[in-house]
Image (cartoon, grey):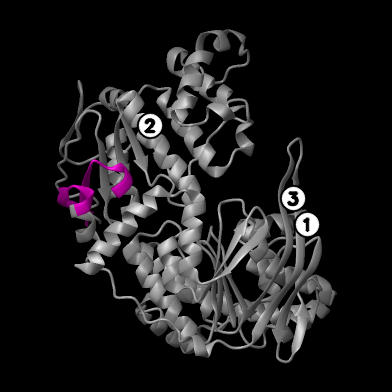
Amino acid sequence: EIKALDGISLEASKGEILGIIGVSGSGKSTLLRILRGVESFDSGEIIVDDVDVKFDSNPYYFRKLREATAIHLQRSFGLWTETALQNVIRKLNGVKYGDEGLTDFNSAYGEFEEEAREILKVVGLEKKADHFAPVLSGGEKQRLIMARQLAKKPKVLLLDEPATMSCPKTKQDILNAIKNINKELGVTVIVVSHLPEVHLYLSDRLVLMENGKVVDEGTPKTIIPKFITDMDAPEPPRPPGEIGEPVIKVTNIDKKFVLLKGGNVLKIEDINFDVKEGEIISLIGQSGAGKTVLLRMMAGLERPDSGDVLFKLNDDWVDMQEPGIIRMKVRRKLGFMHQEFALVHHATIKDQIAGRLGVKGENVIANAKKVAEELDISEQVLDLLYQLTDLPETEAKVKLEKVGLTPDILGELFPSFPETEINKYAEPVFKALDLPLEILERRSYELSGGQKVRATLALILTSKPEVLILDEPFGDLDPITLRIVSNSLKRINKEFNTTILMVSHHVDFIEEVSTRAILMEEGELVMDGNPHKLSEEFIKRCKADYLLGFEELRQQLAGD
């Protein structure tokens, strides 16, 4: 039994932007859901203008609270597959007549078009009014969702981690839209975020939460230093002299994606670079620059249209486009952590590590080859099946279904490791990640947010991969947890000589962890070098004003 909220009392003035900050698990999202009227509470009362809801009020009053508020969740993309304008018109019609599922738009256009265009203008989407919603960028979709919420004419707009997973340019656009909503419409905004830079740019006043309690409130400049005061000291970086020879070569990579009815949306051209043993390289760039696609091509999960990706295996260079046992041997030494990583909710960490070692442990390939021969599976098909173990679970399942197979085939080819062996493999990795070994016996849902991220890293690192690829898996971590993760990665890099290649939108994280950065723009590699210099250039190109203010505060705190 967890006391999610403990005696919370707060006020928001009309037209104010009130920020709520705290580490993951401090109760921020629960509080927002209660303010929205979709979560029950055990004691207390909520007053929004003339709406008064007590913990034991009947459903009528909770419905009135929902009418007075609107909420936007970080990863919510519930949009109609129509234009941005039609999406807002539908919502306006639904608010007035209780019917959002229009079949005839003619009368609705006449009544609501002008108002819908005004709302789109407030969120900065007036030029995208006639664009098809599914082809909008992630940030544009989030602003369209806000526009639909504004159609309800709420008294209070509740925002849960707006734009946390976005690149700096997208985040700046979303934050500007929030400011404009507040200024132009006078809507009171309550924004939950664990990112100090967001509150410094947005919030008039900031509330600090810990363990379900409000522990302090004041201006962002006074509260943010108190929030980050318990952050661990940064781990020293790896000395530059310890970087080795190239272990990956990317040569003349080209890849074009075409969207039907939309023309070319991404063209990756003429990508050339080497990755040296022991480096920590960050790929940085705006959303849609091609970073994830490049990582997937390097891992052999996506085929380039032309060009080569070569991995060094012993003294030989292996082509990642050629399926077979040799490529399997490379993949066994490779760890890939996707953006949508997930632990198995009810499984123990020990069981999940056993499964991971069944895929990446020693002698796995020889055993799988033997089983494949018995099942009359060729080496090329075996390699393609092995490739699925590096994909997110849902993607792997879809690919298996396309060829009439179930995930059971992977269990036959790559059975779980014996439980008695787990501790031997896990102990050094858990030590480097600062995780107690007793976590092995715990189930995923029993772990904190920071423990879950490090436990997932432990799954990938238990087989001691030589190369670790991270595709923005830490985008929604609070800065205190992120520092723990960055220190863990630096220890892994130094102690196991693991080469790390990652994508991140966290500029502080990039500067702190990376030995080198590569900047991509619209499918092209435009800069390669010092992480600090490239991060500054990236911020400048994104026009990310919200980061500049936070950088000034950080320097001031460092001076103090």
Quick check: 490 left or right of 325?
left
Please give the range of residues in magenta. Answer: 200-221
Q: How far apart are marks 2 and 3 (CA)?
A: 35 Å
Q: Which of marks 2 and 1 is in front?
A: 2
Tag 2 and tag 1, C-beta contact below 8 Å: no
Q: Does the magenta stretch include residue 202?
A: yes
Whole-angstrom CA distance, mark 2 to mark 1, is 51 Å
Q: What element carries label 1?
A: loop
> Which quadrant of the figure contains the C terminus?
bottom left
Screen quadrant of the N terminus = bottom left
Q: Which of marks 2 and 3 is nearer the N terminus?
A: 2
Where is residue 115 shown, x and y percent of the image?
A: 47, 16
Q: Write down the residue under mark 1.
A: 404
Q: Vertically, is 174 above or below 255?
A: above
Mark 2 Cα shell of 10 Å, populated few (<14), some (14-19), many (≥20): some
Residue closest to the eye, 512 or 442: 512
Earlier in the chain: of badge 2 and badge 1, it is 2
**Figure check: 19 above or below 112:** below
Would you identify the image quadrant in which residue 304 lies?
A: bottom right
Q: Is residue 15 left or right of residue 338?
A: left
Query: Which of the two discs, 3 and 1, labels the residue nearer the N terminus?
Result: 3
In the rendered structure, the answer to whether residue 430 lies left or right of residue 330 reads left
Q: Name the residue under label 3.
A: 257
Q: Is residue 10 above or below residue 266?
A: above
Q: Which residue is drawn at 41% across and 44% down?
A: 162
Residue picked out by circle 2: 180
Name the residue rendered at 62%, 9% in the picture.
106
Picture coordinates of residue 242, whole percent (x, y)? 52, 90
Q: Is mark 2 on a helix, strand or loop?
A: helix
Q: Residues within 10 Å of mark 1 (few under 14, many from 20)?
A: few
